[in-house]
Image: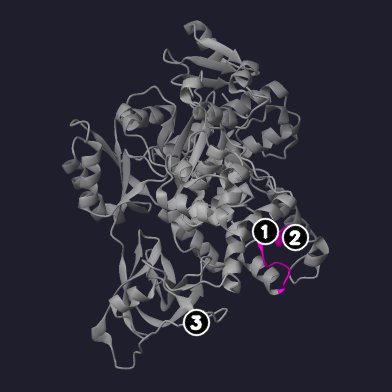
């Protein structure tokens, strides 16, 4: 009976003088009550108390935790209102890569996906889920408690936004079982929250968010968790890693039992006809939902079949995302603007009368090349049909010639570069016009922007505007010049204070320690993306070894084709490239691969083994250990079972170690792990 507590005010003397044991009991009661009320409100949609009463319980809990800090915990419901603001977000490696899904745009694509899945088996069951228009989020739990939550990032490494994610009521802070694993899901902003947020911003004469997805992304990237807490975000979980369960549908049911919110509209389909019926049903009903969806995700249900099908470098072969047809609108083409890219390609862009399509206002759309303009018969002043490919990229669909007035004008591509005046050429088998002048200012600027970008050298504070400013001031003309910049040079520039200048110099210095794949991608080798750069760096280990590689050696590597190999060999054969790399080395750039090395499976004690990591590791981070083991053919899972081969126990190992000992599973300490890894 807590009736003698229910009417106190947080600042009453009685609260300040409360006995510690009584306070702890009251805190425990409030936490249990608030968790139950949150479940009623956010999951069951059956609240048993008013918002005011819920807020009163929450304020009481916050007050008691402030008065008795020894009873504060990371999983208290009070963290839902937001904690201390951060200075920046830290990077965090995912235990398993967060791959993106391949896309399907029509019935033919879905049937083709089904044929590939059934190439080796006739019996296939699928799970269909609504594709929530939000942000992919990874959540890691240790012994049932939320440890870290991160954005997808580049798929390998994301940003730690745990404090913001804790403010989302549909993300459990503590599970109903003390399990350790990593789950994946979608954070999103419900339509009602989006409308309320934009109404509030309109009243303050602030810029409105274009759509719920952008609003959710902006909310979760706030350094102050209180901002995220005020935005009323939500979260659906859609998968987990490292499980002994046999199917995706079984895993979703289990996640529900643990306290996660799964989407209730999912459906198990026994064949592809049922999948197509589900797609058709929700394409018509999407407007009835309280949140935005942009398609349907189709997954093979069986985990063993998923494992057999495997993945490409970018996406799993056992799942596909059907994207709803794009909304089409009409608008007027006012002008065509030209730009010069990093490789010298001249790209025409349509300048449009602003029009709203798929949730955002569009003013520009790429026209790609001259051939496309001629094929579609586009003229300046035309009324055109516009859509967003995949609901993302604005694209001109067609021209409405019946709306022509006779005042429209033909557009002609230039014969010389708009930046440097050099003659433009069209290379064999290419449709694009290209400036081949290596000293073209536009190309140099774009190369610098690419070099500093997130997937390349990731130099914070060195965006397009700053690079354009440094280039215009003649402080940089090559990537090497970045490493010669001095603090006093920046202090003389507009919009640079001592703090921002110091931060930029430090960020440039920090980039010298990047792993080899970052440098490779930053150099902008044709046909070599971020994934291929990682593959090359992992295989050769050093820049010197890669420079000496032959085309045959390169094509022998999985995922490196003949076109890519030819491009790499030709790139390193250039004298100016050799001079550039030598200069970067002299400036202290790291030219070695820092990630897990490729080891022949036959030589690895980890090959074919199931490994569980538990406790605190001191010589390696858990993500580093996981990558090293997987690079050697091992599989790292989150829970101990009869199928586990080795448990690696760090400091303060808990229930997993106990279970391993009960099952008679081999247990290593960290020292033995390091020895076997050859560290």
Which residue in the structure is indicated by mark 3? 416
Q: In the figure, 603 relative to 229: above or below?
A: above
**Which of marks 1 and 3 precedes in the sequence?**
3
x and y, in percent, of residue 493 in the image: 76, 70
Q: In the figure, 15 relative to 490: above or below?
A: above
Say few, some or many: other residues with alpha carbon within 10 Å of mark 2 (under 14 / 14 to 19 / 20 or more). Answer: some
In the image as oriented, which residue stretches furthest toward the right? 488
At x 29% / y 53%, what residue is drawn? 286
Quarter of the image where the C terminus is located = top right
At x 64% / y 41%, what residue is drawn? 592
Q: Is 370 left or right of 64, judged from the image as shown?
A: left
**Which of marks 2 and 1 precedes in the sequence?**
1
Magenta stretch contains residue 480:
yes
Along the viewing direction, whichever of 386 and 592 lies nearer the viewer: 592
Q: Residue 500: which numbered mark, if any?
A: 2
Which residue in the structure is indicated by mark 1? 461
At x 68% / y 37%, what residue is drawn? 63
Q: In the figure, 408 relative to 303: above or below?
A: below
Say few, some or many: other residues with alpha carbon within 10 Å of mark 1 (under 14 / 14 to 19 / 20 or more). Answer: some
Q: Secondary structure at mark 3?
A: loop
Along the viewing direction, whichever of 451 and 91 lies nearer the viewer: 451
x and y, in percent, of residue 60 in the image: 63, 37
């Amino acid at each position: 009976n807590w009736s003698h507590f229910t009417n106190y005010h947080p600042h009453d003397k009685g609260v300040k003088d409360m006995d510690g044991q009584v306070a702890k009991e009251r805190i425990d009661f409030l936490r249990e009550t608030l968790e139950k009320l949150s479940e009623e409100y956010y999951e069951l949609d059956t609240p048993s108390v008013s918002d005011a009463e819920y807020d009163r319980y929450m304020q009481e809990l916050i007050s008691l935790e402030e008065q008795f800090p020894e009873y504060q915990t990371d999983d208290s419901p009070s963290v839902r209102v937001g904690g201390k603001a951060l200075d920046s977000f830290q990077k965090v490696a995912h235990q398993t890569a967060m791959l993106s899904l391949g896309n399907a745009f029509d019935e033919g694509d879905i049937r083709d996906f089904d044929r590939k899945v059934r190439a080796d088996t006739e019996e296939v069951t699928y799970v269909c889920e609504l594709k929530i228009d939000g942000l992919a989020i990874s959540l890691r739990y240790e012994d049932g408690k939320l440890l870290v939550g991160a954005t997808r990032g580049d798929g390998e490494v994301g940003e730690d936004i745990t404090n913001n994610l804790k403010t989302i009521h549909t993300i459990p802070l503590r599970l109903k079982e003390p399990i350790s694993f990593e789950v994946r899901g979608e954070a999103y902003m419900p339509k009602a929250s989006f409308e309320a947020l934009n109404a509030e911003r309109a009243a303050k004469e602030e810029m409105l968010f274009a759509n719920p997805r952008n609003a959710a992304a902006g909310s979760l990237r706030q350094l102050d968790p209180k901002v995220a807490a005020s935005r009323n975000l939500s979260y659906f979980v859609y998968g987990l890693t490292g499980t002994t369960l046999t199917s995706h549908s079984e895993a979703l049911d289990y996640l529900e039992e643990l306290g996660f919110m799964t989407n209730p509209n999912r459906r198990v389909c026994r064949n592809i006809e049922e999948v197509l019926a589900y797609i058709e049903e929700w394409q018509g009903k999407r407007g009835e939902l309280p949140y935005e969806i942009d398609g349907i995700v189709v997954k093979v249900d069986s985990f063993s079949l998923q494992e057999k099908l495997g993945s490409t470098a970018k996406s799993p072969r056992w799942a596909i995302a059907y994207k709803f047809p794009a909304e089409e609108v009409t608008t007027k083409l006012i002008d065509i603007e030209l730009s010069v890219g990093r490789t010298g390609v001249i790209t025409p862009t349509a300048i449009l009368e602003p029009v709203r399509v798929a949730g955002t206002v569009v003013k520009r759309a790429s026209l790609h090349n001259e051939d496309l303009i001629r094929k579609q018969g586009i003229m300046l002043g035309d009324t055109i049909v516009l859509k967003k490919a995949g609901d993302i990229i604005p694209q001109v669909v067609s021209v409405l010639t019946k709306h022509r007035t006779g005042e429209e004008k033909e557009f002609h591509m230039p014969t010389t570069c708009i930046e440097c005046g050099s003659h433009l050429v069209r290379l064999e088998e290419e449709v694009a016009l290209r400036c081949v002048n290596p000293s073209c200012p536009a190309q140099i600027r774009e190369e610098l922007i690419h070099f500093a970008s997130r997937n390349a050298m990731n130099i914070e504070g060195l965006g397009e505007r700053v690079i354009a400013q440094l280039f215009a001031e003649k402080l940089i003309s090559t990537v090497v010049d970045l490493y010669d910049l001095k603090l006093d040079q920046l202090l003389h520039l507009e919009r640079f204070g001592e703090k921002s200048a110091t931060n930029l110099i430090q960020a440039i210095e920090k980039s010298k320690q990047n792993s080899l794949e970052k440098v490779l991608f930053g150099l902008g080798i044709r046909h070599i993306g971020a994934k291929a750069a990682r593959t090359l760096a992992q295989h050769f280990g050093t820049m010197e070894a890669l420079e000496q590689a032959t085309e045959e050696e390169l094509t022998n590597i999985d995922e490196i084709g003949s076109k890519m190999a030819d491009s790499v060999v030709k790139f390193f054969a250039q004298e100016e490239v050799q001079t550039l790399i030598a200069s970067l080395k002299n400036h202290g750039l790291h030219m070695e691969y820092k990630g897990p090395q490729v080891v022949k499976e036959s030589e690895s004690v980890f090959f074919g083994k199931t490994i569980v990591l538990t406790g605190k590791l001191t010589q390696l981070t858990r993500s580093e250990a996981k990558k090293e083991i997987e690079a050697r053919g091992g599989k790292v899972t989150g829970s101990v079972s009869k199928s586990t081969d080795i448990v690696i126990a760090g400091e303060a190992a808990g229930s997993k170690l106990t279970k391993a000992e009960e099952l008679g599973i081999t247990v290593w300490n960290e020292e033995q792990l390091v020895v076997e890894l050859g560290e």
